Image (cartoon, rainbow, N blue to C red):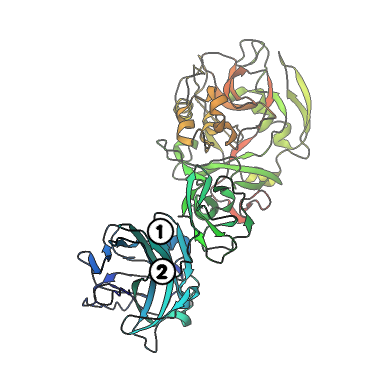
Amino acid sequence: MITSLDELLNEVLFIVKGVMMKKRVLILVVSLVVITGIIIGVSYAFFSVGGSQEQANTFTSGCLSISLTNESTAINLENAYPVTDVEGLEGTSYDFTITNNCDSSTNYQINLESLNQVANSLNADYIKVALYSDTVDNIISTLSDNTSATPTIDNAYESYNLYTGSLGASESKTYHLKIWVDYDATVEQAANKVYSSKINVIANPETTIVDTLEAQFSLNEKTMTGTLSSNVTSATYCISTDNICEPTTSASISGGKYTVELSNATGKRKEVASPIGTLYVATASNQMVCTQLNGTSKVICSNPEKVGYDELVADNTADNNLRYIGKDPNNYVLFNDELWRIIGIFDENTHGVEGTELVKIIRDESIGEFSWDNKPYGTGSSTSSNGSNDWSDSALQIVLNEGAYWNRTSGTCPYGLNGAITNCDFSNTGLTNNAKSMIETVTWKLGGSSTYNDVTASMFYERERGTTVYTGRPTEWVGEVGLMYASDYGYATSGGSTTDRAACLAKELYYWYGSSSDCKNNDWLFDSSSYQWTLTPRSSYSNNVFNVYNYGILNGNLAYAGNGARPSIYLKSNIAISGGDGSESNPYTLIQ
């Protein structure tokens, strides 16, 4: 028995007009239209089709019925363009349900038939299709790669078999078809072409069933699981962020399933404007897993899934600064003839230079372990032998802005109680004259927190810019070289699979360990080999400063303690990127 939808099924039409095809400058509009619909050409569009489907169509013959539904709306890719396969799978699907009302099972095949051939008909080589159902994910193919079938619809000049299956008595199955223009089609191949087609479902008990191998995918965090039909004995797979790939990696099947770990490494990059030029920022990407089963050639792909995170994000403070986040973002910059890293792009309220945003950077590694301050009792702001938490006369501040580090020489640095010193040699790592010429003089905020175990990143940010300080301490300091803030450390996390970024930002930094280890493990400012000083004082004491412990928490410590010091500066607004892409192997280079 043959059931043809020649009278009632809708046409899928592509009218190709215009001059320029490639990529996003093009507009593709594909709509299901009833045969009596009106085709409207749009001169500025590369692809344009008009028409509408007001209600579902049904066709019944004998005891097999086929229903075209609007459950997901008809194909209608308004303002679209030739796209990658990942993007094509995000388009609207054309849905149809096949129901077997017979008392016995029947086999069927789903064909796509090309209609009304003319001299400028679009070749099937440049049309992509994906068919999926509740038992098998997207079977993606170039239309012409499918098995050729005998056309049965009037005016059809070619037919391609997309799928074969079997329906039991009283069984129904819904399919979803997506169709798009191949991303790699050239102007010569597809410009000024016309294409129309119909889906044709043919029921015949003698049809040979070839599509018996099925796979469906599900994503949990970054783990993609492929669930296979019972007749699958082997599988290969690949991961793609654009078009279907060739599955060459052998899958380890257990219990009818296999898993694939997706990674940010396959993510794409976007360009972000900054005061120093364009930053190339890795961004969360849509990824799909494609598989071949039992060595067959048919490719089945998962739905595109958003994986990863944007490396540069707004911190959602009142100043709405942009910050790099994650375990190892591409924020490397060559400064002072060595690797530094970009903390982010900061509003004028943060640094005090009116009318401009500035880029803040920090040295990739510590310059050594020193006291934050250890002035003897009665010297400057110090009221004990433990030193003072006033950055304006801190012993470390003087080394960084006036002493051996600033002058790129050897000398002495603070280390230990009551003014104790240690030799330090910055003749190769101190600031060069060229580096110093790139540093902006800014206002560093010196507000602190009186508490330690109840403070989140946003609370630290507010308090650092507040006026709560130990009695007599300044709330600001104007200078060049500082340290990271406690809030800088907190905001640099991307979170992980157990504790995501939002949960980390809501968690007190004192508790970033144990069940919250995702927070520090995915924070590029964390260093498991060293305690690190911040600029943020614990304001309830005269000699206590917050530091990042080598196991991730943030807590106070006496200023005389020897902790890692990572200088941080703001770049002048006239500094520009001259090369590089921000990766560790190819850091941004700077000129002025």
Residue 294, placed above or below residue 368: below
Residue 535 lies, in percent from the top left, at 57, 27
**Quadrant where the N terminus lies?**
bottom left
Residue kind at label 2, given as amino acid type = Trp
Residue 224 relative to residue 560: left or right: left
Q: Position of residue 63 (x, y in %)?
A: 26, 65
Cα–Cα gap, marks 1 and 2? 11 Å
Q: What residue lies at 21% left-to-right and 77% top-to-bottom?
A: 36
Q: Is residue 409 left or right of residue 512?
A: right
Q: Position of residue 552 (x, y in %)?
A: 60, 27
SS at mark 1?
A: loop
Q: What type is the residue that disc 1 sits on?
A: Glu
The answer to whether residue 504 is above or below residue 202 is above
Which residue is more in the foreground, 437 or 570?
570
First in sequence: mark 1 or mark 2? 1
Q: Is residue 541 left or right of residue 63?
A: right
Q: Which residue is mark 2?
A: 180
Identified at 32% across, 85% down, the residue is 155
Q: Which mark is residue 90?
A: 1
Instruction: Determine whether, in the image, residue 270 is placed left or right of residue 557.
Output: left
The residue lying at 48 percent from left, 55 percent from top is: 302
Q: Nearer the viewer, residue 417 or 411?
A: 417
What crowding class fits label 2: few (fewer than 14 Cα within 10 Å), some (14-19), or many (20 or more)? many
Q: Is residue 366 above or below residue 107?
A: above
Instruction: Please tell me whether mark 2 sits on a helix, a strand or a loop.
Output: strand
Kindly give the residue lying farthest to the front in the view shown: 103
203 and 147: which one is in front? Answer: 203
- In the rendered image, residue 152, in percent from the top left (x then y), is placed at 35, 80
Q: Residue drawn at (54%, 51%), measured in percent from left and top?
A: 281
